[in-house]
Image (spheres, grey):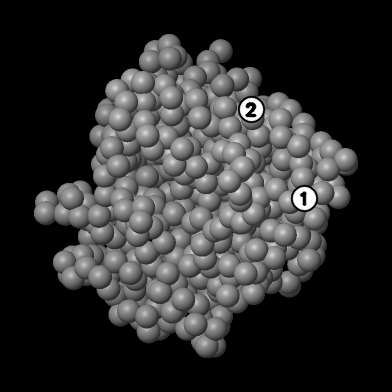
């Protein structure tokens, strides 16, 4: 008997990853990764200005590459049994489109204009606009930031759109809508690109776009028009509905069926943000935190409506009914930089390799982080070691402020690269502890932490430090591609193969790989060093709040 297969696609910061899963056995049959060619070449970005843009053609090219790569790893008979596709993407990663829903960078004359491209999640060029949105929301009859931690972020949907419209007259002239990456991909595959036809993801709308059932969907046209009349016009094209993961967005078009080599009638699930898909793939349940650890971190918690009641959690990236699991409240927090900090330090140490041949440079640079991990793990823990604060890309949680900068103190002429790396690893762990403590103060119970993402699989040193500093056991999910697996689970639900997301996760979940337990002998020293971290953070933050 033939068995239905589903594909999960995870659009990360650097690459597109995909898995194909047998829904009868739960077996992952194949996986493939495709890197974004333009992004890999460093195009359209300016790190000094915190400007990060991605070309929509990168997403299209990687989609075709990753699907063809998957199909090459299974038999033609198996390929014929693919019944559904689920997609997650980074977020908030929006793009301005024309009135037909085509990203402007795909139109003649806009191919090389970064403002016509998708504005990546970690782009912080809209700090001023985010502040303006927060101030207006706090003055408005309805505070539209109350479900987003009380502060709007430069990493999010409306502030990015507003920034582009204000700075680029050509874009302003031709823009007819704005779309989130996780909404555009299903719309592209199903031929429903016009702004009024796009099924918007509840997690993206709620956590990044100020959508809430309490006030009837997105912020009112009057509110958005106060910021910019064009935003009010775009709002008129948005449905008041936003859809939970596992909802069908439609069926794949004949054109995309042929381009990708997939059967006709494949169901495409409504999109979801990568961190939320990763939480699903890792097996999140009530009062557990899934910590997605990559270039940045997203900390996802789900809790019952009864437990959270009417409380509005401050200082986080949103609380949204059904954003992760239908029927539960999804909470999101996180750090704006995590693995990016380690990569920055690696590149700093590798500066001299620019004078080497390309092969030798790649060989040397590729060994730096491994060597740093090994040496830092052997260092004794001492109270007066250097202390760092992890805000190298601003602070996401608690209380987002993308204007903040990181810092290191306590260095001497005897400070080694391994000791500095140790301080950076501890800083990322202290940032994680600050989030956990903030949630506890707000009355959110977290009984366990599940780690997913590349760092959780690659660095025992980082994961053990996290467990020691956070003071909780951390289970590492077995799934190598938790985001893609979560997207596949949602696809299976959208295709009607399971009656609930819980049923899909029970069948398709891959369990855990390793458990890191806090070492009690380090508890006292880490408490002292965490206190120093907070003192340095207060010094760096002129508002005094860390």
Relative height, residue 437 to residue 169 (above, below): above
Q: How packed is label 2: few (under 14 Cα within 10 Å), some, or many (20 or more)?
A: some
Q: Nearer the viewer, residue 64 or 123?
A: 123
Place residue 323 in its image quadrant. bottom right
Relative height, residue 504 to residue 409 (above, below): above
Q: Which residue is mark 1?
A: 383
Q: Which residue is mark 2?
A: 374
Residue 97, percent from left and from top: 26, 58
State how far apart marks 1 and 2 are (Cα): 21 Å
* Element assignment for label 1: loop
Asked whether, in this view, residue 196 is left or right of residue 402, the answer is left
Report the residue at 54% width, 83% height from top: 138
* Element assignment for label 2: helix
Q: Nearer the viewer, residue 432 or 24?
A: 432
Report the residue at 74% width, 28% height from top: 514
Report the residue at 77% width, 34% height from top: 516
């Amino acid at each position: 008997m033939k068995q239905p297969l589903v594909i999960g696609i995870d659009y990360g910061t650097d690459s597109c990853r995909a898995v194909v899963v047998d829904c009868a056995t739960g077996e992952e049959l194949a996986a493939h990764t495709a890197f974004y060619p333009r992004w890999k070449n460093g195009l359209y970005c300016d790190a000094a200005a915190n400007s990060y843009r991605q070309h929509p053609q990168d997403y299209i090219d990687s989609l075709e590459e990753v699907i063809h790569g998957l199909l090459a790893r299974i038999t033609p008979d198996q390929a014929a049994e693919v019944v559904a596709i689920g997609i997650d993407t980074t977020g908030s990663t929006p793009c301005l489109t024309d009135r037909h829903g085509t990203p402007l960078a795909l139109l003649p004359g806009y191919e090389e204009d970064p403002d016509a491209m998708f504005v990546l999640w970690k782009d912080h060029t809209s700090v001023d606009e985010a502040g303006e949105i927060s101030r207006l929301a706090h003055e408005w009859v309805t505070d539209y930031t109350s479900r987003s931690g009380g502060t709007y972020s430069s990493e999010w949907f409306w502030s990015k759109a507003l920034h582009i419209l204000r700075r680029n007259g050509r874009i302003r002239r031709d823009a007819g809508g704005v779309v989130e990456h996780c909404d555009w991909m299903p719309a592209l595959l199903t031929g429903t690109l016009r702004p009024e036809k796009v099924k918007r993801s509840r997690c993206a709308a709620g956590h990044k776009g100020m959508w809430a059932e309490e006030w009837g969907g997105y912020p009112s046209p009057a509110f958005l028009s106060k910021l910019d009349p064009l935003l009010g016009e775009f709002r008129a094209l948005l449905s008041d509905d936003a859809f939970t993961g596992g909802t069908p967005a439609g069926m794949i078009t004949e054109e995309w069926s042929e381009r990708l080599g997939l059967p006709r009638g494949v169901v495409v699930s409504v999109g979801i943000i990568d961190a939320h898909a990763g939480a699903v793939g890792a097996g999140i349940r009530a009062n557990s935190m899934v910590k997605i650890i990559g270039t940045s971190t997203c900390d996802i918690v789900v809790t019952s409506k009864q437990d959270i009641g009417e409380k509005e959690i401050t200082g986080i990236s949103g609380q949204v009914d059904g954003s992760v699991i239908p029927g539960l409240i999804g909470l999101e927090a996180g750090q704006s930089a995590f693995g990016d900090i380690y990569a920055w330090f690696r590149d700093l140490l590798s500066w001299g390799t620019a004078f080497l041949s390309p092969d030798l440079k790649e060989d040397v640079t590729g060994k730096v982080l491994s060597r740093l991990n090994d040496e830092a793990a052997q260092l004794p823990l001492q109270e007066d070691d250097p202390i760092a604060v992890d805000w190298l890309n601003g602070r996401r949680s608690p209380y987002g402020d993308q204007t903040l900068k990181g810092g290191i103190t306590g260095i001497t002429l005897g400070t080694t690269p391994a000791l500095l790396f140790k301080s950076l690893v501890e800083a990322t762990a202290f940032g994680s502890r600050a989030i956990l403590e903030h949630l506890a103060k707000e009355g959110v119970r977290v009984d366990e932490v599940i780690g997913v993402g590349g760092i959780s699989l690659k660095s025992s040193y980082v994961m053990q430090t996290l467990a020691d500093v956070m003071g909780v056991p951390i289970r590492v999910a077995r799934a190598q591609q938790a985001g893609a697996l979560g997207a596949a689970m949602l696809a299976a639900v959208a295709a009607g193969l399971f009656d609930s997301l819980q049923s899909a996760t029970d069948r398709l979940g891959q369990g855990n790989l390793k458990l890191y337990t806090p070492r009690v002998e380090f508890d006292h020293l880490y408490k002292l060093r965490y206190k120093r971290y907070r003192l340095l953070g207060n010094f760096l933050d002129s508002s005094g709040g860390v």
